[in-house]
Image (cartoon, rainbow, N blue to C red):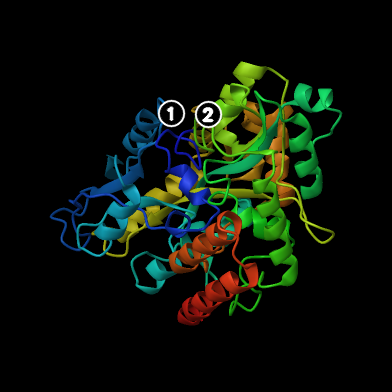
Amino acid sequence: MADNSFTGFRRPFSRRSMLAAGGGVAAAAVLAACGSNSGMSSGSSSSASAKANLTQWYHEYGEDGVQAAVTKYAAAYDKANVAVKWTTGDYEKAVSAALLTSAVPDVFEYANGPTADMILAGQVLDLTDVLGSAKSDFNQSIMAPRMFRDKVWAIPQTIDMQMLYYRKSVLSKAGVSAPTTFEALVDAAAKVTTKDMGGFYAGTDSGVGVLGLPFIWSAGFRSISSDGKSLDFIDPAFYSALTAYKAFRDGTGLLRNASAEWYDAAPFINGECAMQWTGLWALPKVKAALGDDFGVIAFPGFGSSGKPSVAAGAYGACVAAKGANPDAAKAFVKWLWVDQTDDQVEFSTAFGTHIPAKPALAAKASTLSSGAGADAAKLVADVGHVTDIRWTSAIGTAYSSALTNIIVAGKDPATELAAVASTAKTELAKLS
């Protein structure tokens, strides 16, 4: 499902926004659409046998067939009348606005599940009982941002991820291997750069927006400390990692401008760069254009304590607390995203390359059975990271601003990140 795609369906920042690793507003985010809930109250039904009326919201996916598929799923449910709302425009803004009113969707998808603020405000329902023992069927790393205070608040729909694509023949001709350390990435990028081809590309902002969280993970840190009270990466080793990336940006190996943004693989496909950070959603187009002349790897580790990492995420199905038929809505969510395994496989594989949220279903996904698809799935399993639910919009915005100041403007990492730490302390205290 590409183009949104964290996940891929077409709108540039739908599914991709959940992976916006700079961690700004999009990463922490609020999703929504305008509409009204026309469902009947379960307590005021005129007939005991009458079906509940439910509304279900999706953001606008870009791949052909997705809207028809989710409409088909809703129509197949015989316990309620489910009306699908396909939301164009700023879905995030729409959902967040709707959740403050009585005109809420009964069921809606949200990037990585609802935010902690939404949960604390009582805007979504606890779905722990909906999952029950089936919780263990889902990828546990992907489940993490859907958990808050030991309860489940959303059910993963399908997994998307970001990774580094590299051109095998180009690296081979330059005498370099696929980089596994940041130092090797810098070296490889410099050696493959020519007047016609850049080394590495991650967007017109030099990767500041999309690589923010991978910087943290690949430097060997987590975003939030284990006690949940502070940031984990306020450390000289992380300052050194950002300084190294600043030097990379100022050198010759990092391509600063290209024909498209990071989430579009066109620069890589067109030969504008030998390596590009983009998403799993781009895999079908890359393979169609380049055959087997490419590979996929994680973002390399920084320094001796760093570890490679990839960003992973999944839209989660949520149930609004103010919906007219909460029990019916929870039953529908369980039916679709827990019980209907064939639909879940189709949703993950028929409209692009995605990874089923249940590892056991990956065997049914032919796109993941070999080659780069299989490598991508293994990267998620081995070095995949998800945005911490405690990484709020305010923290993300402060962090993104600090990265720009450090990497683009050359300001002091310790000073800039101290301001982020101050914001985080205030934000995390609200959640403790």
The quarter of the displayed image where residue 329 is located: bottom left
The location of residue 132, given as percent across then percent down, is: 54, 60
The quarter of the displayed image where residue 377 is located: top right
Q: Which residue is mark 1?
A: 63
| Label 1 environment density (alpha carbons within 10 Å; few <14, some 14–19, many ≥20) | many
Residue 421 is left or right of residue 426, and the answer is: right
Q: Nearer the viewer, residue 385 or 148?
A: 385
Residue 194 is left or right of residue 144, and the answer is: right
Q: Answer yes or no: do the residues labelled 1 and 2 have beta carbons within 8 Å?
A: yes
- Residue depicted at x 44% and y 34%: 9
The location of residue 16, given as percent across then percent down, is: 49, 44
Q: Which residue is mark 2?
A: 352
Q: Nearer the viewer, residue 104 or 277?
A: 277
- Residue depicted at x 69% and y 59%: 243
Residue 153 is left or right of residue 282, and the answer is: left
The location of residue 423, given as percent across then percent down, is: 49, 76
